[in-house]
Image: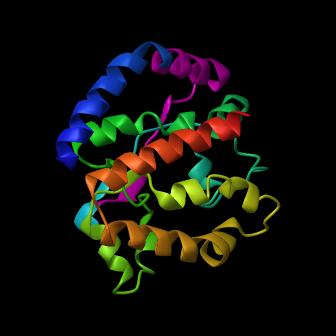
Amino acid sequence: MKRLFDITFSFLGLLLLCPALLFIGALIKKEDRGPVFYRGVRVGRDGRPFKIFKFRTMVVNADKIGGSSTPENDLRITRVGKFLRSYKIDELPQLINVLRGEMSFVGPRPQVQWAVELYSDEEKLLLSVRPGITDYASIRFRNEAEILKGSANPDRDYMEKIAPEKIRLSLEYVKGISLWTDIKIIFLTIKALFQKAD
């Protein structure tokens, strides 16, 4: 049922949002002529790597001039990117990953390889499900960039201040996974986005 839900609503979402996605892509392209999408490698279900789809919100080759974690005041963020990040619009292209079966609407956020290599045996349980666009941790830390603002070492501060609670919440989701929980998290995510807009 979960996979059927993902396929149905990711397809409908892409279909309905297509004009908006094309418009956003044009804005990104106009700003600096760089690629529309960021295609960073993430670790998926059973430890399989995949390339995530996100609207590019940072300068070209940002991963070569800075770390994986991004504070709010990161100078690599573009003008258009700052707006997209504020309302999580940069995450919308992940509907493609959901349709392809690499991600789900709800699940632990996919991590970079170096972070996964630090998982304990219990934390490796997170790799037993498809990573998701949102989960309890995404809602709790929707202001992650603000927490990291001004950090001299964002990756270190992420691992110390954010990662432990994120992992705890993600494990809580995996251990009690259900379609009803997914629907609840989707509605809580939408509510959080509207609160951000206010």
Q: Looking at the image, which residue is at 32% across and 68% down?
A: 176
Q: Is residue 38 left or right of residue 83?
A: left
Q: Is there any visible trace of residue 170 in the rendered image?
A: yes
Q: Looking at the image, which residue is at 32% across and 41% down?
A: 97
The part of the chain drawn in magenta is: 21-44
Is 70 covered by the magenta stretch?
Answer: no
Q: Residue 77: image x %, image y %? A: 70, 41
Image position of 191 with respect to 13: above or below: below
Quarter of the figure with residue 84:
top right
Is 33 covered by the magenta stretch?
Answer: yes
In-front residue for pair 193/162:
193
Quarter of the figure with residue 66:
bottom right
In-front residue for pair 45/177:
177
Q: Residue 96: image x %, image y %? A: 32, 35
Q: Residue 101: image x %, image y %? A: 22, 45
Q: Residue 143: image x %, image y %? A: 68, 53
